[in-house]
Amino acid sequence: MTTKLDPDYCPKCGLLCDAVSDPEGSDSKPQQGDVSICFKCAAILEFGKDLKLKVCSEDKINKLDTETLVQIVTIRSYILGNK
């Protein structure tokens, strides 16, 4: 399911981001601290205050559970392989 958001820009490549999709099909809305991936440059991002996108820190990435890391690698591989 896709959730519309207030428009924001990827801090890495500048892509306008105004929606998110959950890889598991959930209709939950993102919250501060949730991780996302830019669909253009595959940057690993985090929702900050007011759901503004920021680059996810290495420390946060290293603390993610294995299932989430596998999802991130899979999605990033798809994005980067389709350029």
Image: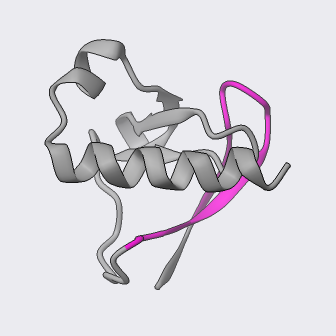
Q: Tell me: residue 63, above or below residue 4.
A: above
In the picture provided, is 64 more to the left or to the right than 10?
Answer: left
Please state the horizontal and vertical placement of residue 28, each as a whole percent of the image: 29, 75
Q: Residue at x 33, y 77 (%)?
A: 24
Q: Quadrant of residue 47?
A: top left
Residue pictured at 26% horizontal, 50% vertical: 68
Q: Nearer the viewer, residue 11 or 82?
A: 82
Q: Total number of numbered labels?
A: 0
Q: Identify the residue shown where x is 79% and y is 34%.
A: 14
**Would you say residue 14 sits in the magenta stretch?**
yes
Do we see residue 34 in this rendering?
no
Q: Is residue 12 left or right of residue 1?
A: right
Nearest to the observer: residue 61 or residue 82: 82
The structure residue drawn at horizontal position 67% and vertical position 36%, both measured from the top left corner, is 10
Q: Which residues are magenta?
A: 5-23
Q: Would residue 35 be found to the left or right of residue 60 on screen?
A: right
Asked if residue 31 is positioned above or below residue 26 in the image, the reply reads: above
Q: Nearer the viewer, residue 51 or 2?
A: 2
Residue 67 appears in the rendering: yes
Q: Residue 38 at what x, y percent from top left?
A: 62, 45
Q: How far across and how far down the image is residue 77, in percent?
A: 59, 47
Queried whether the magenta region covers residue 8, the answer comes back as: yes
Which colour assignment does the render follow? Answer: one colour
In this picture, is 80 found above or below 82? above
Judged from this view, the residue extending furthest toward the right is 83
